[in-house]
Amino acid sequence: MLINYQKYYRENFTPERYKAYQADFEKEVGKLYAISTGPYFLRERNAQKIRESILPALMKFLGSSEYQERVYERGWFLPKFPIEKKDFFGSADFHIDGDEIRLIELNFFLPGHFGLVELFPKLFSKNFDMELEVFAEGFEVRLAKFLKERFGGDKIALSINHLGLSVHYFEHYKYIENFLNKNGVRAKVVYAKDAGYSDTGKAMWDGEEFDGVFNIVIPRIWEHNPEEFKNYTDLFHKTPESFFPNPWCWTIGDKRFLNDLSALEKKQHGLSDDEIAALQSVTLKSASLKDFSSVHHVCSFFGGRENLVLKPIDNYHTQGVFIEPSIEQIEEIFSEKADIYIAQECFNAEIIYYENENKEAVEPWRSQLRVEFFNGEFSNFRSYGFSDPFGLSPMMPVVIVK
């Protein structure tokens, strides 16, 4: 694989081309988000295994009534509203080392930068004169058509969060609004906190009725800020069918899902032996921290703290995550936050070759493969590269190689 990266940086990359790529991106989106200098090369056999075996089995597991009912029984801050295949819009993140593929986490909700998945690989291909498959080709048109059919109308609210990082992503949301409007949807970015309910039973913002709510608010932000989103919660109570995607997807796919996957046995969830084998091949050991009797028990189970990752059950990105934590960190989390943390086996992605905008090698550099699904089917490969797992993670287009 090293030769693929070195060949790209030798033959395709120049700092001038990267600046042109950034300029094109900013012109289209209205803001420059983190985009990589190079692609992520994915082996064809790994791509095929993920698309044909792993992801379909994952979708079947998530869609099983046996699993979903167990989650509903836990309860949540919103009234139960069963999810359907049409709500399946999210991503599964993998670390790959050679032919070893491991599922790191599931994001059973709108993936970050989801509105840019068709645009950025096209701009990359153009500026670096590199042919690549745009896996999300036609996504912008498909999403517009899907939303109109889903809501039975074309007036759709793009409901966003007014807090924190959402300010950073506002131009991204406006880009989505623009491409939906170009494709026959009357879309409008609105703040969830200002939601209302009309006399005719529709979602409403500023006296304006909408046929549906494209919910871009991350449910964990919604849940942990009840006063800020009181109006939005009231709207969901009145008309949950008006929301897409169903926010319940978030809790069905939170980190506790990794525990269920780790404990998967034959004959569960209507899965065949082949589907079970496909999922087990990518599953890391995982368990709720509260299920351990002591810090020693935790470390022993995973073969030492250096083989351990601690994750909050509903975190975003790497917030609250500890990779190879110190004994002191494990003790603190175990004593104070065991109810909201899982412990997972550590598996690092392979080191790949990467250069910065000045053609200087960045070491070490790894990448997390994001496999996206829409309407319950595969929709895209993309990647996030990183040197520091807690630092900047630029988007990398994926290129399939033998």
Image (cartoon, helix red, strand yellow):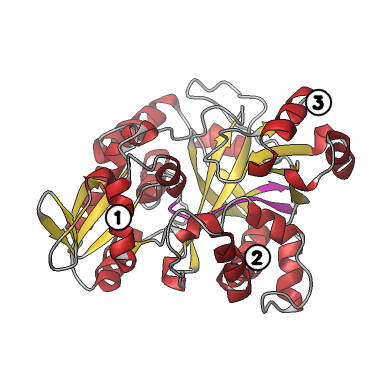
Above or below 8: residue 217: below
Please state which amino acid type lies under the numbered disc 1: Asp
Which comes before the other along the chain, label 3 or label 2?
A: 2
Q: Quadrant of the C terminus?
A: bottom right
Residue at figure coordinates x 47%, y 45% from the top left? 220
Dominant SS type (magenta) = strand
Three-letter code, disc 2? Ile
The quarter of the picture where residue 391 lies is: top right
Q: Position of residue 223 (x, y in %)?
A: 44, 46
| Label 2 sits on residue | 54
Crowdedness near tag 3: few (<14), some (14–19) or many (≥20) residues, C-alpha within 10 Å: few
Asked whether the viewer can see residue 282, the reply is no
Residue 21, above or below 58: above
Q: Within 10 angstroms of label 2, few (less than 14), some, or many (20 or more) residues?
A: many
Label drawn at residue 234: 1
Marks 3/2: CA–CA distance? 35 Å
Q: Secondary structure at mark 2?
A: helix
Q: Which residue is mark 3?
A: 327
**For residue 141, side relative to residue 373 (left or right):** left
Report the number of discs. 3
Secondary element type, mark 1: helix
Mark closer to the chain start, 3 or 1? 1
